[in-house]
Amino acid sequence: MSDATIDEICLVALAEAFRGDGELLCHPMGPFPVAAGRLARASFEPDLMVTDTIAYAVVGTLPLGATVTRPGAADEGIVVEGYLPFRTVFDQAWSGHRHVVMGASQIDRHGNQNFAAIGDYRKPKAQLLGLRGAPGNVINHTTSYWIPNQARAFVESVDVVSGPGYDRVAALPEGSGRFHEIRRVVTELAAYDFETPDRTMRLRSIHPGASLDDVLAATPFELTVPDQVPASRLPTAEELHLIRNIIDPNNIRKHEFR
């Protein structure tokens, strides 16, 4: 019987978003997505290009909080593959050879994402991050989302579109969305994808400990639910070792679940 906790189950579900990516730039944003990317590379997707979150591509598995210039206790075997300045990142981004994981203050059934503002953009109730790089991220390459509070973030319609969803990209001139792919949305309850004929959100798996009723209660829009919804897989013993002892020995991942 596994002793995996919900944070570890979610981490594996998010790491699964990188399965099959091969040799491209893994560019997660935030400690939890960074841990998921490092887990994917250290276990089932060894060709992913990962960074120290600052400016270097590295081989090996750095713990969260460590960088090439400030290594941690578990940095044995870390090799710098190359320098990764902004200009190189943008070369990767514009060519589609990048998979980014972002957060979302709001997301709808089409995958439109908002972390710019709540309310009217011209006079918002709350000013958030702004559009930042979300439009360019989402239109140019594969994107996934980590959302630790589903009931708060899932909405019928986002107040501001930071990252465009499938409906908005479909309305653009032909060819504009050739690199656009929203691979996965992972929350504290379940994992979702957009593998439907109309490219709207589909329930992919439910995390152990949650139920379909929990998922539907936290989803205000029409969600595609297959006849049989599997449980999200549990971490393997090796994955638990990597998470607890190598990638995140200080339990930074658990801060998302307080």
Image (cartoon, grey):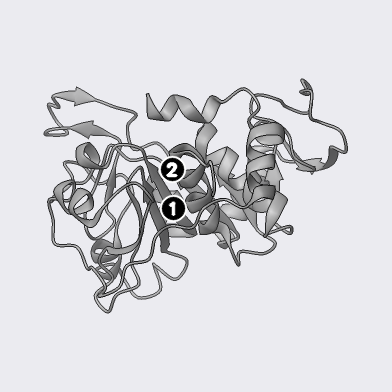
Location of residue 169 by image quarter: bottom left
- Indicate the amino acid at tag 1: Ser
Give left or right: position of 105 versus 258.
left
Which of 226 and 103 lies nearest the eye of the viewer? 226
Q: Secondary structure at mark 2?
A: strand
Q: Is residue 76 among what the camera can see?
A: yes
CB-based contact (under 8 Å), mark 2 and mark 1: yes
Which of 140 and 69 lies nearest the eye of the viewer? 69
- Indicate the amino acid at tag 2: Met
Look at mark 1 in the image and give the residue it sits on: 144
Residue at the (72%, 34%) spot, across then down: 246
Give left or right: position of 15 versus 133.
right
Give left or right: position of 32 versus 238.
left
Give left or right: position of 204 versus 156.
right
Residue at the (57%, 25%) spot, across then down: 251
Instruction: Quarter of the image for the C terminus: give it.
Output: top left
Which of 197 and 244 lies nearest the eye of the viewer? 244
Look at mark 2 in the image and give the residue it sits on: 102
Q: Which mark is residue 117?
A: none
List x then y, in percent, for residue 233: 49, 58
List x then y, in percent, for residue 238: 69, 49
Residue 169, placed above or below residue 114 = below
Residue at the (40%, 74%) spot, across then down: 175
Q: Residues within 10 Å of mark 1 (few under 14, many from 20)?
A: many
Q: Is residue 55 among what the camera can see?
A: no
